[in-house]
Image (cartoon, rainbow, N blue to C red):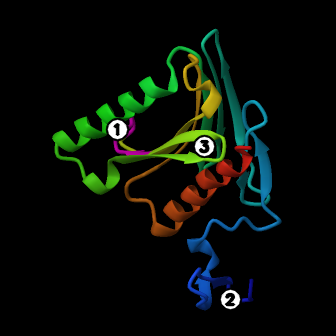
Amino acid sequence: MNKKGRIKVKLQSGNEGWVEEKYTSYIPNNWQKLQLIDNYYFFMLPDLKMDLQKEEGKNIRIYRYRSIQYYISMGIILINDYKTRVKNRLDDVTREISIGKDKMLNWNKEFTFGNYKINYTITTMHHDGDISESFDFVKLDEMNLTKYYYVTVDYSPDASAEKKLMQRKILFSALQSLR
């Protein structure tokens, strides 16, 4: 990285250039690693104090990290399987669009990443009117179990572009723990 916060990149085509670090998934070495559930983790800005709230019950375990600026949570849910969760997310997205909400803020995409099936969802269906971006995920060999994980970030619709990029970087950093 250079002094102006840019990273040199090389495309598959062989072309090289510079990209501002904030537009990448690059996690600087000084970011702190915060533990989530079952050895999953995410990275957060250095020296940012976050409060941790845990909720544990028979069918759920949820960790919520909060600061004045950021919110991220992760849970393990033991009452539905992953396929049911993906269907429910798609129903949520469809419902939001049907009532006139922005299609750019209500969509989902399912993909495979290593040994995991992941459903990435962005939706305006949030009890506070916020936007939620989340990954629901499960190991491929556990897809038929009544168990899945999620990790999510929430932010205000009028949050700055910079804050939205940072929230997304934090969310995507959790993918590093999927091994």
Comes first in the chain, label 2 or label 3 = 2
Residue at numbered disc 1: 125
Query: Which of the numbered marks, if any, corresponds to residue 4?
Result: 2
Q: Secondary structure at mark 2?
A: loop
Image height of 161 relative to 172, above or below? below
Q: Amino acid at mark 1?
A: Met
Residue 172 falls inside the magenta stretch: no
For residue 68, say whether it is visible.
yes
Q: Nearer the viewer, residue 15 or 8?
A: 15
For the residues marked 1 and 3, what is the alpha-carbon distance in whole angstroms?
16 Å
Q: Amino acid at mark 2?
A: Lys
Q: Secondary structure at mark 3?
A: strand
For the residues marked 2 and 3, what is the alpha-carbon distance in whole angstroms?
28 Å
The part of the chain drawn in magenta is 121-128
As drawn, is 123 to the left or to the right of 65? left
Residue 115 location (% of width, % of height): 66, 41
Residue at numbered disc 3: 72
